[in-house]
Image: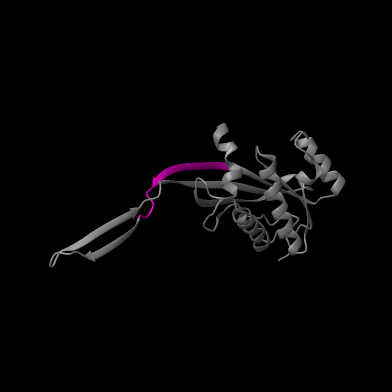
Amino acid sequence: MINKSILASITLALCACSAGPQVKTIQALSESADAPYENILVISLFKSFDSRRYLEKEIVKQLSERGIKGVASTSLMNTKTPVTRQTFVDMVTSLNSDAVLITQLVSLESKGTMKDMNPQATRNFRPTHYYNVWSYELTEYVEPQRLELKHLLVLATQLYSVVSQEAVWAIEVKTKIVQDFDQLSGYSVIVNEAKAITSHLARDGLIAP
């Protein structure tokens, strides 16, 4: 069970600066799968509705750029819509989807460290009225310490065939994130996660390359 503090921080983690995602194949596409797919319902299962919406929207955008129809589940619901199997089954039926892409949080580890800022100093040398005697002044400007946060975010993504109603492919995407406590949010992590997912969908033959 993932505690509430981890779930509450997933939006922040998804919107920080990071290194490129590392992708691990958990389930390779089987030869019997009815791929490639052309009409995919995209679902993200996070506690935060905004986190779900952000990632789904970017995955749909990446699919669209490859000529694949993708629909974000959050575009068909609001925060009060029950997140149940029947809700998504009804979406599949109305959209006539041939596949369902589901992404969910596997783990989020966070660690905070206080970092010293680089001090700046000015030095002034001046002669005095005395022979070979100099005046020396040192002024240092020291900023407060900053809190650096490091996250290890792991997302699991599975693709289900509507015909077989079974998972036909799965990957795990791991991202290392570093940010200052007061750092402004960015969108780059979400974009990188979506690109990693869609590029591997294409690479593994689940969608047209």
Image quarter (top left, top right, bottom left or bottom right) of the C terminus: bottom right
Q: Nearer the viewer, residue 138 or 11?
A: 138
Quadrant of residue 112 within the rendered picture = top left
Residue positioned 57% across, 50% down in the render: 184
Q: Residue 68 sits in which quadrant? A: bottom right
Q: Position of residue 162 (x, y in %)?
A: 78, 47
Quarter of the figure that contains the N terminus: top right
116, 194: nearer the viewer: 116
Residue 92 visible? The answer is: yes
Residue 113 on the magenta span:
yes
| Residue 202 colored in magenta in the image | no
Q: Residue furthest front?
A: 129
Q: In the rendered view, does 205 fall on the left or right side of 115?
A: right
Between 200 and 75, the one nearer to me in the picture: 75
Residue 193, quarter of picture = bottom right
At x 39%, y 52%, the residue is: 117
Instruction: Give the percent coordinates (x, y) of residue 108.
Output: 53, 42
Looking at the rendering, the stretch of residues picked out in magenta corresponds to: 106-119
At a point 65% along the width and 63% down the height, the residue shown is 203
| Vertical side of 193 occupied by 84: above or below | above
Residue in the image at 76% along x and 55% along y: 34
Position of residue 34 in the picture relative to residue 171 (left or right): right
Residue 166 place in picture, x, y as percent = 72, 45
Q: Residue furthest right?
A: 94
